[in-house]
Amino acid sequence: MNLSSFFKIDNTELAYQLFETQMLGGDVDKKYRYSVNKILKECTPKGDTYPERQQVLLKIIELIGDPTTPKQRFIVAKAYAWSRAGYRDKAIYYLKLYLNNPLYKEAYIHIKFNVDDTPEKSKLHHLSEMYGYLGKAYMGEYDFDNALSAYEYMIDKFPEAPPAYMGKCEALIKKNELTKCYNWLLDCKKLPYYKLNKQYGKTEEENWFHFTINRLLKDVEEKINKGYVYRPRKNKK
């Protein structure tokens, strides 16, 4: 029997509520609690205490079916992005489908990542997060050129966020462009976010951007000095 018809609930919202169980601090709406707990129980292997995460993600995807709305595309894209390596091709497809269509505003419009964030800043943070998932999926598929494009888009839209720099650095290393990477990181030290001050953090420990760039520079410099060459595994592209 279809859960939505039996409990008179919406499958899209049920899928979204299931997602809440996979997030730290997530809270399920009481209207959906019975249905969510039933699904979680079905996804829990016999003898185990916790549901099998991949089974929960697949159930989320099943509940949505063919995504046609921003919310549905967001849920399916994120579910595949969180899935195991065997689902990377679908993650790439649905992340691109989401990013090339109207965004799901409720995913970011009421969220402030910093006290002074505007709705537009929250949107850029959301875009950065989703492109980060896309870059990671491309990296896993050894498609370093497309991964690099995703991380560069992140940097363009949300330049103070260190994860994008970490991703771009990894992509350049795996393209064996270490000198290019090193020189680019040196240029990053000229960015305002790198400065130690009251706005961005007075110490390296307080300023995540400053700390990240220095750590990446050290790592790339060591690789250059050792003559590091990245060689993908033979069974990959």
Image (cartoon, rainbow, N blue to C red):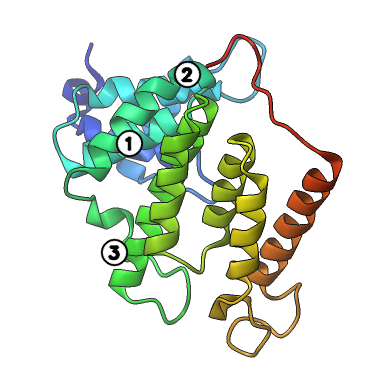
Left-right relation of 173 to 7: right
- Residue that mark 2 sits on: 55
- Say which residue appears at 36% left-offset and 39% top-offset: 17
Three-letter residue code for mark 2: Gln
| Towards the viewer: 40 or 145 | 145
Viewer-nearest of labels 3 and 1? Answer: 1
Could you tell me which secondary element the residue under label 1 belongs to? helix
Quadrant of the frame with the N terminus: top left
- Say which residue appears at 37% left-offset and 63% top-offset: 157
Compared to 100, does 164 lie above or below? below
Three-letter residue code for mark 3: Ile
Badge 3, how many Cα within 10 Å: few under 14, some, many 20+? some
Residue 33 place in picture, x, y as percent: 38, 37
Could you tell me which secondary element the residue under label 3 belongs to? loop
| Towards the viewer: 233 or 209 | 233
Three-letter residue code for mark 1: Leu
Viewer-nearest of labels 2 and 3? Answer: 3
Q: Earlier in the sequence, mark 1 or mark 2?
A: 2
Residue 66 place in picture, x, y as percent: 18, 23
- Quadrant location of residue 175? top right
Q: Earlier in the sequence, mark 3 or mark 1?
A: 1
- Residue that mark 3 sits on: 109
Tell which residue pokes out farthest to the right in this image.
226
On residue 95, which mark appears? 1
Residue 148 place in picture, x, y as percent: 47, 43
| Towards the viewer: 198 or 104 | 198
Compared to 112, does 27 lie above or below? above
| Whole-number angstrom distance, CA of label 3 to CA of label 1 | 19 Å
